[in-house]
Image (cartoon, grey):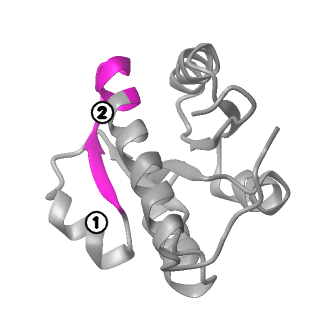
Amino acid sequence: MGDTFSYRIFLIDDDVDLLMLLERVLAAAGYVVETAASIEEAEDLRHRFAPHLYLIDINVRGEDGRRLCWKIKMQEGTPYVKVLLHTGYDWNSGRGALFGADEVLAKPAPSEYLLLRMRYHLKRMELERARGTGLDLPASN
């Protein structure tokens, strides 16, 4: 991250306490954060927010976060956007690739670990951009 650039991260989870905690942690780390407590709310916000990275709970109020992941990664032509699925269930992370997920993370996870994984994927996004392997997102100032 540069001095004038802030990555945009979109958190989607029905656990409002977790959303508030992660929002504070990520904002303190210099990220611009948007949250949604349902897939419907996320659909309303995500195009305006244009995130660089999503952290999506697999089961959000009975809705399937994997479908949103599929839509973002496979249907909308946004190869630079990183999508991390987040779940409290014992779920084989390799299955996340079936939905286009860049990674599946277990929850609860220490915030330091989530930050580490997000930084890794954002760095990967920058390298992919530099190679010209997909579409570009506008920068946020």
Quarter holding the N terminus is top right
| Quadrant in the picture for residue 81 | bottom right
* Residue 92: x %, y % from top left: 14, 58
Residue at position x 56%, y 23% from top?
26
Q: Nearer the viewer, residue 103 or 13?
A: 103
Residue at position x 64%, y 40% from top?
7
Q: Nearer the viewer, residue 45 or 89?
A: 45
Label 2 Cα neighbours within 10 Å, binned few <14 / some 14-19 / many ≥20: some
Residue at position x 47%, y 47% from top?
122
Image: 92 above or below 10? below
Residue 15 falls within the magenta-colored stretch: no
> Which mark, residue 107?
2
Residue 112 falls within the magenta-colored stretch: yes
Helix, strand or loop status at disc 2: loop
Task: Name which residue type carries label 2.
Answer: Lys
Q: How many marks?
A: 2
- Cβ–Cβ below 8 Å for labels 2 and 1? no
| Quadrant in the picture for residue 12 | top right
- What stretch of residues is rendered in magenta? 102-115
Label 1 Cα neighbours within 10 Å, binned few <14 / some 14-19 / many ≥20: many
> Which mark, residue 96?
1
* Residue 52: x %, y % from top left: 61, 53
* Residue 140: x %, y % from top left: 78, 44
Task: Give whichever of discs 2 and 1 has the lower sequence position.
Answer: 1
